[in-house]
Amino acid sequence: MEELVVIGNGMVGHRLVEALRDRDTAHHWHTTVVGEEPRTAYDRVALSSYLDGASAQDLSLTDVRGPHVDVHVNERATAIDRAHHTVTTATGRVLTYDRLVLATGSTPFVPPIPGHDLPGCHVYRTIEDLDAITASAQGARTGVVIGGGLLGLEAANALRLLGLQAHVVELAPHLMPAQIDEGAGALLRTLITDLGVHIHTGTASTAVEAGPDGRAARLALDTGTRLDTDLVVFSVGIRPRDDLARAADLTIGERGGIVIDDTCTTSDAHIHAIGEAAHHRGTVYGLIAPGNAMAEVVADRLVGGSATFTGADTSTKLKLLGVDVASFGDAHGRTPGALDVVVNDAAHRRYAKLVVSDDATTLLGGVLVGDASAYATLRPLVGSPLPGDPLALISPEGGATLGADALPDTAQICSCNAVTKGELTEAIARGNHDVPALKTCTKAGTSCGSCVPMLKQILTQAGIAQSKALCEHFPQSRAELVEIVQATGTTTFSALIEGHGTGHGCDVCKPAVASILASLGGGHILEGEQATLQDTNDRYLANMQRNGTYSVVPRIPGGEITPDKLIVIGEVARDFHLYTKITGGQRIDLFGARLEQLPAIWKRLVDAGFESGHAYGKSLRTVKSCVGTTWCRYGVQDSVGLAIRLEERYRGLRSPHKLKAAVSGCARECAEARGKDFGVIATDQGWNLYVGGNGGFTPRHAQLLAADLDEDTLTRYIDRFLMFYVRTADRLQRTAPWIESLEGGLDHLRDVVVHDRLGIADELETAMAHHVASYTDEWAAVLTDPDKLARFVSFTNAPDTPDPTISFTTTRDQPVPTTTTVNLGMPARRPQEATR
Amino acid sequence: MTTTTPTATWIDACPTSRLHPEDGVAVLLPDGHQIALFRTRDHHLYAVDNIDPYTGAAVIARGIVGDRGGEPTIASPMLKNVFSLRTGQSLDDEHTRLNTWAVRQNQTTVQIAVPAQEQTP
Ligand code: SRM
Ligand SMILES: Cc1cc2nc3c(=O)[nH]c(=O)nc-3n(C[C@H](O)[C@H](O)[C@H](O)COP(=O)(O)OP(=O)(O)OC[C@H]3O[C@@H](n4cnc5c(N)ncnc54)[C@H](O)[C@@H]3O)c2cc1C
Ligand code: SF4
Ligand code: FES
């Protein structure tokens, strides 16, 4: 085994270790990583989300530690001894290497103006920097960012999120001079100014002046103005961290950076450099994609491969303060003879420029601001013949028509992970037939995600039916059927399939349509024909168990229950000989009820004031709560009260998949709200609303949708969120994958729910109000309706005879199903989606 | 299916008014066999085993009636295996099938044919 030492545990160093782990299956290498930061590698690109609800844990990248990889955090490498192949660290550790990789990244450049090092002056690169900025922002009102580039604007947004009035001071005449041109910069400025950020372009900062407390208090500008400010963030550029390499006499570029060749090797054949620390053919890249490409090259070389790095695309697409900005290829038109084609649509706040060759046949680059949806199709076209009139491509209707089929195989679809269209088509041919499979096998789409729409297009183009058809009976998607039902006022499945489908239906479309009809206010789910559409559990308003018996779950809102009610549950269970268990949802499940016993059991429960818990439905399950201010010494709000009110508001709402919720009384989060489809966490100002969490097969943490809401606003946002989900999600799609599937993801959702960008908030709230007003307990309704009761018989010719195949044995003092011999030798196949 | 077996005995299953389209019922035969009885939307009658061969639970009557490529089907509510109502054949697994039973409407009663000699087909 040979020793690999990696200095730097940032994004690129991390990628190297991951790539090597995937390739070095023979375990030829043992890797030791030393990183100066106090934690293992995290997603620096997503750093700003740390101020928007994400925790350090959320940002952390996969854990690569294991028998073949050691990672030492909080440890700086201090010297390289090339003669003896050793690296010394600040703790005195001496590591011997066969190969060394420098992945030391860069440091923010702080211009040496007077006062640049006063307390209250910051940079924006690490989690610790953000912690320091947050601390400075306590009680502060204003913050200034020096530098109007990509990172500066992110920092300005961070200051806004911290509640500060933000200013941006930029030396160049327009924002983001490295990426975009003047026209785009002008629009960007307008859009950002509208968000309340003050922009000062063409302005130099001359000094930071201290206040009486010795902290930064003013920024002096060359215009003679002084900006009062409580803190300053420098974001004027980065410098490669090449100090170790310099001291070890490796070749360094003129303007810094460790010089590497196309194999990413430095002037010492045993030492590689990658990422922002490296200088390749005159360029130091400040983006993640080229760094990742270098990491892959080194990993490949370490296992005997011959990959090379010959330069990288610096295209970017970002959302800055909610504004789309993209720049790709030769965005500044530096190619001799290059022509510009520009659409500057101030009314619709859209700027698009394409740079084309002098004969207007080849796309060279471009800039998009305001609406960058064409980026995914345009960027891969760079260097290729244009499929049509360039102006048509950027006119509002044009971009959409240009598809993946216009691209050559060599076109790079995922620039973050350098995946070409050819590689994707190959992966598809090998049987990777959906986006998740493509992500796993090619890594495309796993970083910034902007190429995901293209992945879908390529799948479609490869003939993989990304069919949205519900099943063979309906060519429409669930969302389309919702629209049809709404528009036509259809109230039955028969009418819907007659008018809009074919055949008789099946176990896919019938429950899906039943759920749509129920969500849109269709009355009792066992009414007439409706009953025959319902899935296994809904059909008898109980959950079918493996021996054909049912479980019964009365609703216990918020998990709060009186002793008297507990006694009733106990008595019912005892009298009907049911197995009882506390569920994972803070309530009690009674198992082993025979079909014909369900009405009698529910009669007792309903009489005692219980109602259906909808454990059987694709509907709201529970709103879990912690005790909150009612009892807890840390509680800051009444979480139990709110949980009960929410559970009672949304009970019975039929949805594309089950819905779970929780309310915690403080940030300690004892109710696990961030593991729920919607979770509410108390703050001293009100409530934070998180959406899109779940446990189950692919656990997801819910993301912050809106903060510090009063109960009224909170409820309105949840109303909108749930109704929007009910109307647009796919069947059996929980909220997390639904949010991911929305174009624009969480930001779009926030636009709809919080900012009402689609203008449908009132309609969604009205629909929810209708649901709330028309709610009745499903079980109580069954008990008073002889037609519905008639369904609950064991045999039509022997209504009260128990099913002779059902029997029980006793385990831990309770009845459990006898494992019938019928099971033995039976085929054990489970068709997909067996669970309900 | 409305064909009869020469040696069959017809047993009353239920009044026709109890059998709603696409809404199955379970029938208990004198010998303890359980039948799942269905009427489709176009008024065909079908009778198949009520026991789901995959799990041994007597639940087929509680499944969803539909069609696959025109073939009338019943989906077991347990693990969603789909069977032809006509032949009882599983449409996903050639080795598994439900027994089928002759069934007819006699005046206002639905009847199932049980083989006379051997009542366990
Ligand atoms: C009873 C219970 C287990 C228990 O003894 O604690 C349970 C039992 C079942 N769960 Fe669950 N789940 C129960 C809590 C959970 C939890 C925990 C929670 O809610 O806090 C989870 C993870 C959280 C989540 O859902 O995000 C959970 C994740 C699942 C999943 C996976 C969902 C996913 O998105 O991946 C399924 C499968 C599905 O729904 O497709 C499932 C499906 C089921 C089904 C319906 C499976 C089936 O088809 O028979 C089980 C039947 C329930 C019954 O017969 O009453 N159950 N299930 C819990 C009932 C809670 C309640 O009071 O309503
Ligand atoms: C807020 C922000 C937003 C960004 N957004 C984007 C974006 O949208 N798109 C994009 O492409 N790029 C973006 N970037 C840039 C991207 O994060 C970097 O290109 C990428 O992180 C570079 O990776 P790296 O491993 O080379 O450097 P780093 O991630 O900086 O890692 C270097 C690591 O080495 C450690 N180190 C340095 N010297 C030593 C030593 N002597 N001993 C031990 N450890 C040492 C450092 O502490 C650091 O942890 C963004 C950066 C920031 C800060
Ligand atoms: S989340 Fe907070 S208020 Fe609720 S129980 Fe836990 S510590 Fe107490
Ligand atoms: S382009 Fe960023 S993940 Fe593919």
Image (cartoon, coloured by chain):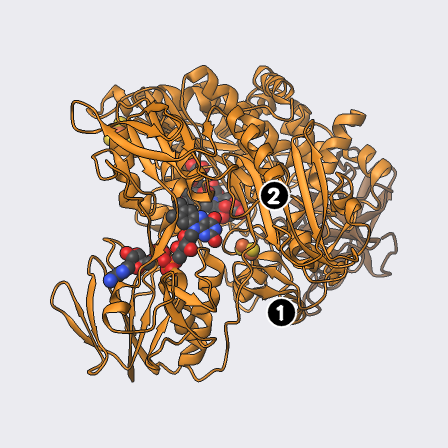
Chain colours: A orange, B brown
Mark whose residue sits in front, 1 or 2:
1
Q: Position of residue A104 (x, y in %)?
A: 31, 62
Image side of residue A187 versus residue A30, left or right? right
Q: Which mark is residue A753?
A: none
Q: Is residue A383 above or below residue A52?
A: below
| Residue most extreme to the left | A92
Residue name at image x 59 percent, y 19 percent = A765
Q: Quadrant of ligand 2?
A: bottom left
Q: Chain of mark 1?
A: A
Residue type, mark 1 in image: Glu
Q: Is residue A32 above or below residue A756?
A: below
- Residue A603 placed where, x, y %? 50, 24
Label 1 crowd (10 A; few <14 / some 14-19 / many >=20): some
Q: Secondary structure at mark 1?
A: helix
Q: Is residue B90 visible?
A: yes
Residue A299 percent location from the top left of the image = 42, 74
**In the image, what residue occupies the spot 85% across and 37% down?**
A498
The foreground one among A138 and A121 is A121
The answer for which chain carries disc 2 is A
State the residue in front, A497 or A310.
A310
Q: Which mark is residue A423?
A: 1
Q: Is mark 2 within 8 Å of ligand 1?
A: yes
User: Where is residue A18, by image quadrant?
Assistant: bottom left
Whichever of callouts 1 and 2 sits on the residue coming sooner in the sequence is: 1
Where is mark 2, residue-wise?
Answer: A536
Q: How many marks?
A: 2
* Residue at image coords 38%, 60%: A255
Residue type marked 2: Thr
Q: Residue at 50%, 76% (x, y): give it.
A: A308
Tag 2's secondary structure?
Answer: helix
